[in-house]
């Protein structure tokens, strides 16, 4: 069976992290229904039928009774072919359904980014910053230190956890679209794929060296950027390219090299 294309995209949709175009959702449902179709029960194989009939013929002669219907062999051959045809058609239908999803993603992937992932990202980032600010005002952001904190603070911490999970689903969905051509060749290291002001936060030459947020959990990553002025975003490939060249324009060395 052919697996569902771009699984993280649909996982995030199912979790309520973002919306998707109705046509894409319907295409996914078509694939899901086909994939859920049960296999037909395999029929009795012609060879088995022949062996059984030989026993029945001998028994009939021995007992002086009517001979069995030998057309059962031909019926078994027809049933076997019909069974194989059913398997081939089911597999072919799933391939077609999956290909239609891929075609829609290639055709409408940019709209998915602009009209669905980007708004969800903005809402998540705004909500996280507000919740994190509540934790900062309390004086601690670590969940293990907030077990006895006021209800408002505990709720803000829970919100940070929920929005961090949502953020992870949104970025995973965006990453899943890269195989359909939605990448920025001008940004091979992906510096600006999540952080609009990456160069301000990590100005190391050619992005050599670990970033300050390397190895952080998603919640910690988001918290770090709240506290350090990170401008998290969900750019289209063209918007990402513009940031790459804006950095190059501001850097005489890179500008001279035509970067």
Image: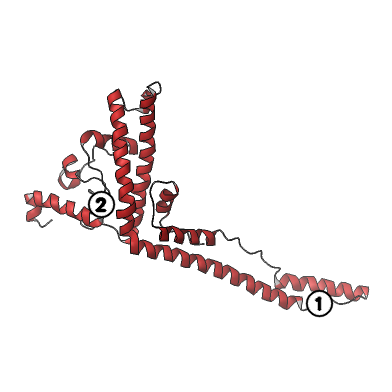
Q: Residues within 10 Å of mark 2 (few under 14, many from 20)?
A: many
Q: Can residue 215 be seen in this view?
A: no
Contact? badges 2 and 1 (CB < 8 Å): no
- From this view, report whether residue 38 is shown above or below residue 89: above
**Disc 1 element:** loop
For residue 203, which numbered disc appears in the image? none
Colour scheme employed for the rendering of this structure: secondary structure
- From this view, report whether residue 215 is shown above or below residue 12: above
For residue 235, which numbered disc appears in the image? 2
Q: Residue at x 28, y 27 (%)?
A: 136
**Disc 2 element:** loop
Q: Which residue is drawn at 25% across and 56% down?
A: 237
Q: Earlier in the sequence, mark 2 or mark 1?
A: 1
**Mark 1 = which residue?**
69
Q: What is the distance, in whole Å, between disc 2 and disc 1 at their CAs?
A: 71 Å
Q: Quadrant of residue 197?
A: top left
Residue 226, x across and y down, in percent:
25, 35
């Amino acid at each position: 069976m052919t697996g569902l294309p771009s699984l993280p995209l649909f996982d995030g949709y199912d979790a309520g992290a973002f919306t998707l175009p109705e046509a894409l959702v319907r295409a996914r449902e078509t694939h899901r229904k086909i994939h859920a179709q049960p296999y037909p029960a395999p029929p009795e194989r012609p060879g088995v039928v022949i062996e059984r009939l030989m026993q029945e013929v001998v028994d009939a002669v021995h007992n002086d009774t009517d001979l069995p219907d030998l057309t059962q062999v031909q019926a078994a051959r027809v049933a076997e072919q019909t069974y194989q045809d059913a398997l081939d058609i089911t597999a072919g239908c799933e391939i077609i359904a999956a290909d239609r999803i891929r075609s829609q993603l290639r055709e409408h992937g940019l709209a998915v980014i602009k009209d669905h992932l980007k708004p969800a990202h903005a809402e998540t980032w705004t909500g996280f910053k507000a919740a994190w600010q509540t934790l900062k005002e309390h004086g601690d952001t670590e969940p293990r230190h907030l077990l006895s904190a006021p209800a408002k603070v505990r709720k803000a911490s829970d919100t940070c956890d929920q929005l961090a999970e949502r953020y992870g689903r949104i970025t995973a969905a965006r990453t899943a679209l890269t195989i359909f051509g939605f990448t920025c060749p001008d940004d091979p290291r992906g510096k600006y794929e999540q952080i609009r002001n990456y160069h301000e936060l990590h100005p190391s030459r050619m992005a050599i060296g670990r970033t300050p947020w390397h190895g952080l959990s998603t919640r910690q990553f988001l918290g770090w950027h709240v506290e350090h002025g990170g401008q998290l975003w969900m750019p289209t490939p063209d918007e990402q390219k513009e940031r790459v060249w804006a950095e190059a324009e501001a850097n005489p060395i890179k500008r001279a090299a035509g970067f």
